[in-house]
Image (tube, grey):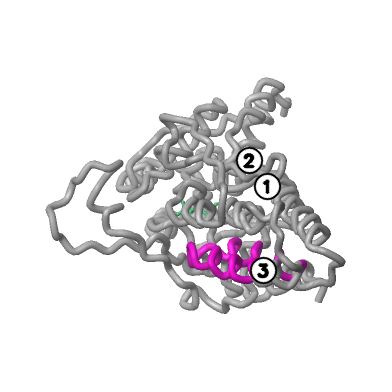
Amino acid sequence: MTISGKAANNLKALPRAVSWDNRALHLLDQRRLPQERLLIRCHGIEDVYEGIQKLAVRGAPAIGIAAAYGLLVGLFDNKLSLTALKEKLAERAEYLISSRPTAVNLPWAVNRMMTVASGEFADTEKLLARLEQEAIAIHQEDIKACHQIGDHGVSLVRQYPNVLTHCNAGSLAVSELGTALAPIYRAYEEGVKVHVFVDETRPLLQGARLTAFELQSVGVDCTLITDSMAAHMMALGAVDMVLVGADRVAVNGDVANKIGTLNIAILCGYFDIPFYVACPVSTIDAHTATGMDINIEQRNSVEVTHIMGEQVAPDGVNVANPAFDVTPANLIAGIITEKRLVLPPYDDNLKALLAVKSGL
Ligand code: MRU
C-alpha cells in the first residue's frame, strides 16, 4: 500500500469540536453544520452545560473533553479561598454530569478532574494550574487513542472496504480523527478504495449533517442513505461491514449507541455482515454490568415532530424520543480500542482489558 500524501494533508483539515486557547473554551457549534462554522466561546459554566445539553458539542469523548475544560471556565481570575474554590468545583462537577446521562465519558472525565482537585494545594492558582494540566492530558490522550484505534481497525477496513456507519463517530465526536471513522481515515490514507454508506440518523441527522460533511471534506467516497435504506443496501450485497461508535460499553459487552444502532446490528445478524464497535477504553464502564443498567437519555419530543425546525407531525401527537439504544454483546463481532481489538467472550476479555488499564 502507498501512503497518499494528499490524503494525509486532507485529514489535517478535519474539523475540531473543542479547543482551549489562552484559558478560553470554544465549541464548534455542531447544530449549525454543515451550513455554517460557528465557534461558541463559553464564558460561564451555564454556557458549557447548555453546549453539551443542546448538542452544540456531542459525541461521547468530545463531551468529556469539553466538560473537563468547562469545569475551569471563568475561574482563573477568581478571588475565592481554596476551600470555596473546591466547593465550587464540586458543584460544577455535579451540574455538568447532569447535562447528559448516557455517555460515560462525561462523568469519567469530570470525576478524573475531581480526583485531582481532592489533592493538597498551596493556593488556588496551583490547584487551577494542575487542573488545567489534567484537562489538557485528557484531551491529548484522546487524540492518541483515536490514532491507535485507527491502527487497530485499519486491517478490518482493508478486508471489508464497503462500510456502513451510523450517527457521527468521527473527528467532530472526539478530539480528532474519530473512533469509528479513524480506521476508515487510516485506510483512506493508505490508498484503500474505501466506500462508506452514511445513515442519515434521525432524529437529529448526525449522519447527514456531520459524518457526510466530514467524509466529503476529506475526500472519502461516501453515499448518504436514510436509515430505512440500510437493509436494502445489505440485501444488494453493497455492505461488507458495519462500524459504529459507542456511548457506554457494559462489562458484558453490551453497547449503548445512537438510537437505530440496534436495528443495524440485527440486520447484520440476518445478512451475516460483521458488526464492529470502536471506542476508547474510557467508554467502557467498569461499574455497568450489562446494557440493562445503562440510563438511556430521553430527549424533547420536538426533535421528532420537527426536522431542522420545520414541523412535520400533527400538533399534540404522542412522541417517544430515546436518544440511544443498546446492542447486545452477542451481535458484536469485535470492539476496537486503543489497546487492542477486543473479541468475544466480552465478559472475560473486557475485564482483562480494564484490569490492564487500572493496573489491577
Ligand atoms: O447524541 P450524540 O450525537 O451525542 O450521540 C453520539 C453517538 O451516539 C456516537 O456514536 C457516540 O457518542 C460515539 S462518538 C465517538
Question: Mark 3, mark 2: which one is toward the viewer?
Answer: 3
Q: Amino acid at mark 2?
A: Leu
**Range of residues picked out in magenta:** 88-116
Amino acid tagged 1: Cys
Q: Which mark is residue 177?
A: 2
Q: Is residue 157 above or below residue 315?
A: above
Q: In the rendering, which numbered label is found on residue 118?
A: none
Dot 3 or dot 1: first in sequence order is: 3
Residue located 51% across and 48% down the image:
57
Q: Which mark is drawn over residue 111?
A: 3
Q: Earlier in the sequence, mark 2 or mark 1?
A: 1
Determine whether the residue tagged by mark 1 lies in a helix, strand or loop.
Answer: helix
10 Å neighbourhood of mark 3: few (<14), some, or many (≥20)? some
**Along the viewing direction, whichever of 245 and 318 lies nearer the viewer:** 318
Measured Cα–Cα span from mark 2 to mark 1: 6 Å
Amino acid type at mark 3: Asn
Which residue is at a point 24% across and 47% down the rendered structure image? 306
Question: Does the image show residue 39?
Answer: yes
Kindly tell me whether residue 170 is visible in this rendering.
Answer: no
Is the shortest distance between ligand 1 and the CB of mark 1 under 8 Å? no
Q: CA distance from mark 3 to mark 2?
A: 25 Å
Query: In this rendering, which labeled residue sits more in front, label 3 or label 1?
Result: 3
The secondary structure type at the circle numbered 3 is helix
